[in-house]
Amino acid sequence: MANKQERGFAAMSPDKQKQIARKGGEAVARNREHMADIGRRGGESVSRNRDHMAQIGREGGKNSHGPRDDAHSRN
């Protein structure tokens, strides 16, 4: 088999790799608060419709574990 030349990230010098990786880390740090805000808004949306989310959970439980007997059922 012929020798393959390194391409892309692997072909870069270690310093160039570090420089690119550092930029990625900085981008994550800048977006952390934004992403946390999105998560909070999603949680608020779910908590407004708890009955609907509970129904979804019950359906998932039935599908994955089968029906429960009356002794363990809440409804």
Image (spheres, rainbow, N blue to C red):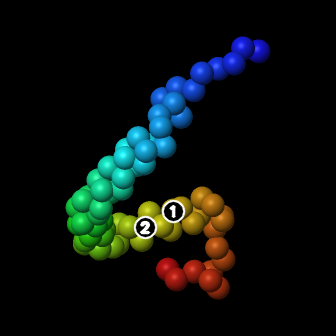
Q: Give the side of residue 75 with respect to residue 37, left or right.
A: right
Q: Amino acid at mark 2?
A: Gln
Q: Report helix, strand or loop for mark 2.
A: helix
Residue that appears at 29% across and 53% down: 27
Q: Give the side of residue 18 with respect to residue 50, left or right.
A: right
The reply to whether the C-beta atoms of the residues labelled 2 and 1 are less than 8 Å apart is yes
Based on the displayed image, in which of its 4 quarters is residue 62 positioned?
bottom right
- Few, some or many residues within 10 Å of mark 1 (<14, 14–19, 20+): few
Q: Report helix, strand or loop for mark 1.
A: helix
| Along the line of sight, the residue nearer the viewer: 39 or 21 | 21
Residue that appears at 48% across and 43% down: 14
Q: Is residue 34 above or below residue 75?
A: above
Report the label total: 2
Q: Amino acid at mark 1?
A: Glu
Residue on which disc 2 sits: 55
User: Which residue extends farthest right?
Assistant: 1
Q: Percent from the top left, x then y, of residue 58?
A: 50, 68
Q: Is residue 21 above or below residue 11?
A: below
| Along the line of sight, the residue nearer the viewer: 39 or 69 | 39
Residue on which disc 1 sits: 59
Which quarter of the image is occupied by the N terminus?
top right
Q: Percent from the top left, x then y, of residue 39?
A: 30, 65
Q: Is residue 16 visible?
A: yes
Based on the displayed image, in which of its 4 quarters is residue 54 positioned?
bottom left
Residue that appears at 41% across and 41% down: 16
Q: Is residue 42 visible?
A: no
